[in-house]
Amino acid sequence: LLVGGGAGFSGDRTDVAEPVVDTMIARGLPSVLIFETLAERTLALAQLARCVDPEGGYEPLLVEMLTPILAKCLANRVRIVSNFGAANPRAAARRIALLARELGLRPPRIAIVSGDDLSGADYRPLLREAIGPRIDQISVVSANAYLGAQPIAAALLAGADIVVAGRVADPSLVVGPALAHFGWAEDSWRHLGPATMAGHLLECGAQVTGGYFADPGRKDVPGLDDVGFPIGEIREDGSCEISKADGTGGYVTTATVKEQLLYEVHDPAAYLTPDVTADISDAQVTEISRDRVRVSGVRGHPRPATLKVNVCHEDGWLAEGEISYAGRGAEARARLAADVLRRRLAPLDLRVDLIGTLSVFADDAGRMLSQAPVGDARDVRLRVAASHQDKRTAERLTREVTALYTCGPAGGGGVRTSLRSRLDTLSCFVPRESIRAHYEFLP
Amino acid sequence: MSSVALHRLAHGRTGDKGNRSNISVIAYRPEDFALLVEQVTEARVAEIFRHRHPTRVTRYLLPKLHAMNFVIDDVLDGGVNSALNLDSHGKSLAFLLLDMTIEIPGGRT
C-alpha cells in the first residue's frame, strides 16, 4: 500500500501533492493521499470561522489543495483521506462535491467522519468530569476528542473515494487506510504500532524529506525550493519504506527519517494514539537505495483506555510592537527604547527581544537578557510583547511603541504593531466509551 | 584532550506539545554515540535551559538509532498559545542544545 503525504499543516504548499499522486500512479500499487492540516490551534480558529459562516470552518485552502489532483485521484482510484474538515467536515464534503462538479468530474463518494466535536451542551458534564470546575470559568471555543483509525477504515471499506474528518490523531490518517487494506484486527498491536509510526513519518509532509532539516555546511539539502513530499510503502507486517515524489528536490536519508521519527515523541517506548501504544525503542532505519529508507523494529502495545480531548478557550489579548535601530550605538539605543517602554507601561509585564543580539533563545521573564553583556550590535530590531485579559490595557503597548518615532531614541524606524485575541488549550482525557466515532456518506 | 561543539558530532530537531519540548540528539557517526551518552547528560541539558526554569529533564536512549531524546518539561513559558516568545513553539531550541561543548579524548578526531 502506498500512502502519500499531500500536506503537513494548514497553510502548507498546494503544488506539492500532484507529483506525489503522479509518482504513486506510476508505481502502480493501491494508493492513498493524505492531507494533515490540523494543529492544536487550527481547530479553534476553524470553530470561530464557523460561528461567522455556518458553511465555513473547514480548511481555508481546501479548494486550492484539491484542484490540482482531484481528477487524477478519481480516475486512478487514489483515495483521499484528510482531517481538512476541521470544525465542519460536512460543509467541507459539500464543497468537494461542488468542486468535482465544477471540474466536470464524476460525483465522488465522500464519507464524513464525526463524533470528535464535544463543544455541544450534551458533552459539558463529561468535560466537567475531566477538567473540573474550571470548565465553567472559561469561554470555550472548541472541544474535540482525538478519534482513531476505525471510522476511516470503515468508510474506505464501504467504498469511499474521499474521507473527510475533523479531529483525528494525525497518524490515524495512515493507520485507517492500512487497516482497511490489510484487514488487520483492531487489536493487532504488532501491526498497528509500525503503521502508526509510518503515519507519524508521513503526516508532517516535507519534514521527512529535507524540510526542517537543511543546515548549510552541515546538512546540505538539494533543491529545497522544490522539496518533494513523502510516500510511504507499507507492508503487510506494518513496516514501511519512506521515499518521495519523483523529480522533486529534497532527499530521504537515515538522518531525515531519524529526526522525524523522534519529532514530538516523549517516551520512545510509549507513543500514545487512540489506536495503539507504539514503541520505537528498538526501531531501526536502513537506507535501501537513494531516497528510500526502511523503518523496522517498531513494536505495538495495547491502546490507552482513554481518548485525549483538547479544549480551546479565549485567553485575552496579545500585543506586539517592533522598531529598528541601526549604525553606531544601535544596541544602546534599542535598550534605551526598551527602558522607556517598561517605565511607560508599568505594571504591564513586557517581554523584550533585541533581534540581532538575543531573542528567541531567551525566556519571557528576561533572565537571559539581563545576564547578557551589553554589546555594540549595529543592526537591532527591538521587539516587545505583552498579554492581558483586557484589550485596552494590551493596546497601550502598541501605542507606546508607535510613539517612539518622535519621543524615543534617535533614528528609530520601521514600527510595526499588532493586537490579536488569544486562545489557550486545556488537555484532558475521557473514557473511550463516552465518544461515538462514526462515518456517513454525503447524500 | 580537545573540545568541539556538539553540532559537529550530532544533529537533532525540536518538537513541542503544550509546555513541553523534546529535542533529539543523533550522532552522525555510530562510533561517537558512547561519547555523547557520557557527556550529553540530563544535568548538563538542564543547565543549558536554566534561564527557562524547566521543572524536569528526562533523557531516553535509542542505541539502535545512535540517538537520544530529551524531554524538557515546562520550558516553553506556557507553550505555543501562551508564550510571548516570537518562537513560541521553541523550534530554535535544538540549536541552543547543539552548541554544547564536548570534550574529545586525546588522539581522536
Image (cartoon, coloured by chain):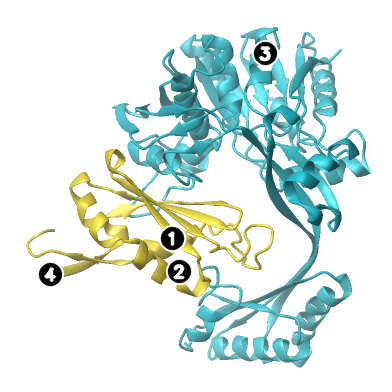
Viewer-side label of 1, 2: 1
Q: CA distance from mark 1 to mark 2?
A: 10 Å
Looking at the rendered structure, whether the residues under marks 1 and 2 are on a common chain is answered as yes
Q: Amino acid at mark 3?
A: Ala
Res. B49 mark: 2
Tell me the residue that label 4 is attached to: B1
Viewer-side label of 3, 4: 3
Residue A66 placement, left or right of A233: right
Q: Which chain is cyan?
A: A
Q: Amino acid at mark 2?
A: Phe
Local crowd size for mark 2, using a 10 Å CA cut-off: few (<14), some (14–19), many (≥20): many
Q: CA distance from mark 4 to mark 2?
A: 26 Å
Residue B62 % position (x, y): 32, 43
Res. A154 mark: 3
Residue A376 lies, with reference to residue A263, above or below; the image says below
Marked residue chain, label 2: B
Q: Are marks 1 and 2 in contact (CB under 8 Å)?
A: yes
Q: Nearer the viewer, residue A295 or A188?
A: A188
Q: Kindly identify the residue that appears in the image at 67 percent across and 13 percent down.
A: A154
Q: Amino acid at mark 4?
A: Met
